[in-house]
Amino acid sequence: MNKRSLGNTGFEVSEIGLGAWQIGADWGVDVPIKTALEALHVAADAGVNFIDTADVYGAGRSEKIIGEFIKERSDRIIVATKMGRATSAWNDSYEEIAEAAELSCNRLGVSSLDLVQLHCIPEETLHNLEAFENLEKIKQEGLIKNYGVSVETIEEGIFCIENSSASSLQVIFNIFRQRVVKDLLNIASSNNVGIIARVPLASGLLTGKFSKEHQFAESDHRNFNSDGQLFNVGETFAGVPFDLGIEFANEVEGILSKELDEATLAQKSLRWILDHDEISTVIPGATTSKQAAQNAEVSAMNSISRKAYADLKFLYDEKIDSSVRGRY
């Protein structure tokens, strides 16, 4: 597994990480703890050393499972968690942030968090800058080692780079969300800010496994948030309407049909992300050992051809970009 630097954290992280939202909740099925642990171990055995979670995933379930997992490992696993969405009354005070960090430490079974990220907090709170001041204090006290921000818009990302000492940004980045390439990646890289790519497969659209007739469970965010009913629509299908996303995914599959023999559409889509050197790590989810293994395999794959890359950009510019909904 190839590794890349995560901003100024000093961490060398696997370029394929693992996003742990799915083992928490909101994906239509409760992943049994045994199954989740097996997937985590398969990923780690394949060289994955970076896991992203949040206190709100399954109301702490995801962090607890990861805590059990890291107890079973002798190798160094870097865990990034997030805070700021566990309660509607969350604020950016020192007490609130310190308490959230302590609770995450307890669930993970660690004394200090490797990386804590503000979890898409309101823009006005972000601009207040108090959260960053308090994160810096808590870092100096040793409860956290590094801090970053999970952002919803490119403008928020640039603001964080220019007005804080955040070590990383987590952004939605995939074939359906390409504006990041020209508007954010170079700025982040030149300021030694790591980039964590989330929603890399557009909530499964870029796996090619779905048809327009597919019905998601009521407890799956791809059902209850398909149009942004509960949170930013960009977190679900990258903001693209589902039926239209199926059509776009079919076009993407056609463009990539002669790329990377034997690779799945999901693997090709992850490889496209890794072909951007500014990306520190990409965090696809995995609820089975097979998915975890297939994701890890992408690190050793060749790059997408320049022609296919150009064709995907043309498709994005001509059709997809205008169809992306939500804050971007």
Image (cartoon, rainbow, N blue to C red):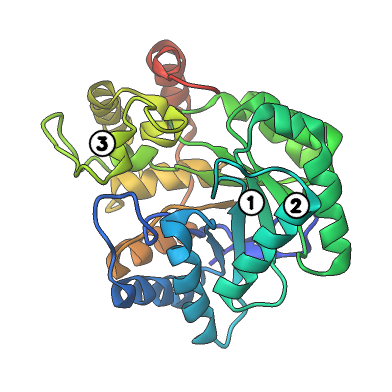
* Few, some or many residues within 10 Å of mark 1 (<14, 14–19, 20+): many
Circles 3 and 2: CB atoms closer than 8 Å: no
Q: Which residue is mark 1?
A: 280
* Few, some or many residues within 10 Å of mark 3 (<14, 14–19, 20+): some
Q: Position of residue 226 (x, y in %)?
A: 31, 30
> Which of pointers 3 and 2 indicates the residue nearer the eye?
3
Q: Position of residue 233 (x, y in %)?
A: 42, 28
Residue drawn at 83 percent across, 50 percent down: 134
> Which of pointers 1 and 3 indicates the residue nearer the eye?
3
Q: Is residue 135 left or right of residue 258?
A: right
Q: Nearer the viewer, residue 77 or 31?
A: 31
User: In the rendered picture of this protein, how many numbered marks are placed on residues?
Assistant: 3
Q: Nearer the viewer, residue 165 or 45?
A: 165
Residue drawn at 67 percent across, 57 percent down: 116
The quadrant of the picture occupied by the C terminus is top right
Q: Position of residue 256 (x, y in %)?
A: 33, 36
Whichever of labels 3 and 2 marks the residue nearer the N terminus, that label is 2
Name the kind of residue labelled 3 in the image.
Asn
Q: Which residue is mark 2?
A: 7
Residue 47 visible in the current orientation: yes
Provide the secondary structure element on which disc 3 rests.
Answer: helix
Residue drawn at 43 percent across, 20 percent down: 324
Q: Is residue 21 left or right of residue 327?
A: left
Separation of marks 3 and 2 at Cα, in angstroms: 35 Å
Q: Is residue 219 left or right of residue 279?
A: left
Circles 1 and 2: CB atoms closer than 8 Å: yes
Provide the secondary structure element on which disc 1 rests.
Answer: loop
